[in-house]
Image: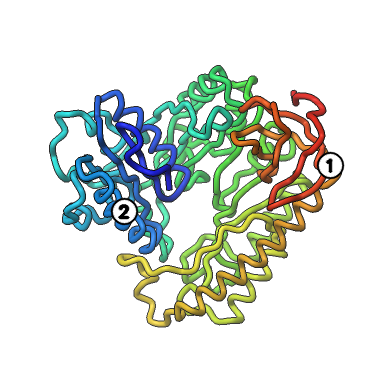
Amino acid sequence: MAENPGTTPVEIVTFGCRLNAYESEVMRAHALDAGLANAIVFNTCAVTAEAERQARQAIRKARRDNPDAQIIVTGCAAQVNPDSFAKMPEVSRVIGNMEKLEKRSFGIEATERVRVNDIMEARETASHLVEGFEGRARAFVQVQNGCDHRCTFCIIPYGRGNSRSVPMGEVARQLNALVDAGYGEVVLTGVDITSYGTDLPGEPKLGQLVRRLLQAVPGLKRLRISSLDCIEMDEDLFRLFAEEERLMPHLHLSLQAGDDMILKRMKRRHLRDQAIAMSERLRAARPDIVLGADLIAGFPTETEEMFANTLRIVEECGLTWLHVFPYSERPGTPAARIPNQVPKPIRKDRAARLRALGAEREAAFLASRIGKVEDVLVESGGLGRSAHFAPVALPAGLAEGSIHRLAVTGVAQGRLVTEHPAVGEAA
């Protein structure tokens, strides 16, 4: 969640994914340009029922703390379930996921209490330039929105609509502007980023987009790709990981499970052997690559044996950064209607076991970096990120947004420790 509401004329409280965070900055700019004041905007997430519950709780608290503020609710939960938020006495207005990216939604003339249109009618992805929201270090560029797939546990397509892409030339324009503004790293983000280009002339793939961006923006020092679906990774993208040092050796996979039956019941598009083969191919192309993954514990019908396959795939894919969710029923999804739901205490226990394994894998990776030299992007508060996205404790005096080669001397509190002065600014 964002900082506490009520501290600025327009406060944005963000739940959920990086794309939501990107869009929050679009809304912040629109709200300020439109002259909105004394307002709190909640950008909600619908990925689980718990995410929606947390948003409601935060909205109620914000009203208690800010009795005179206008409270606007938007995001995926508002798109999927607008009436429920409109019925909350604390809420002033509800706007949809398309409408939240329109400046007129935040103008003083915008009085419609509920403005949520059919997201499935969306045909374009708004290409808004955001100057970055992690200080002056890292910026995010939305290249795709929506999803054409219908995983049984996921409500997101109904909050985001079908897949649609930003033309390559527009993405390149944004990257050039961000580099000119001094950003050392840019992350390409979207809902289902490997579906990029299917709606554009010529149907370019994600790899073609990345190659063009690296050629068109020579001043870009570091490029990252957000979470992607392993079965849809194209040949050009594999080659780029082997050839292009500016493409960071770090990928986060939308894996979800390691058991074939559970993957089929989730209606995923890959099986476990395909995920393992893809991970092995990535390491052959880029031996130092570090992989993370989303994993769901306790999906309906999951037995202990099936869960053991998910535990094993962490090792078999060589995963380091794990993002673990205990399965949460989401009303309106097919998975919520499956009769054999795993008891919640078992879900929580399995999630805890996965997280413990993830903590072991993370600790082992951090320890393996001791004695090595890392190119570190300087963030704020004495912290930075290595090329592998490892958190780094920094020496004092390094400028935010700069990239430095630092010697790793140890690990403390889950961060690489760099006690020596910078060896020199990286190229």
C-alpha distance separating marks 2 and 1: 44 Å
Position of the C terminus by quadrant: top right
Left of 91 or right of it: where is 7? right
The numbered dot on residue 372 is: 1
User: Which secondary structure lies at badge 1?
Assistant: loop
Q: Depth-wise, is mark 2 or mark 1 nearer the camera?
A: 1
Q: Which class describes the residues within 10 Å of circle 1: few (<14), some (14-19), or many (20+)?
A: few
Q: Position of residue 190 (x, y in %)?
A: 47, 42
Which of the 4 image quadrants contains residue 371? top right
Q: Identify the mark nearer the N-term, 2 or 1.
A: 2
Nearest the eye: 240 or 235? 240
Q: Position of residue 98 (x, y in %)?
A: 29, 40
Amino acid under disc 2: Ala
Q: Position of residue 181 (x, y in %)?
A: 54, 19
Q: Position of residue 372 (x, y in %)?
A: 84, 42
Residue annotated with mark 2 = 77
Query: At x 75% / y 26%, what residue is drawn?
Result: 426
Q: Is residue 161 visible?
A: no
Left of 130 or right of it: where is 389? right
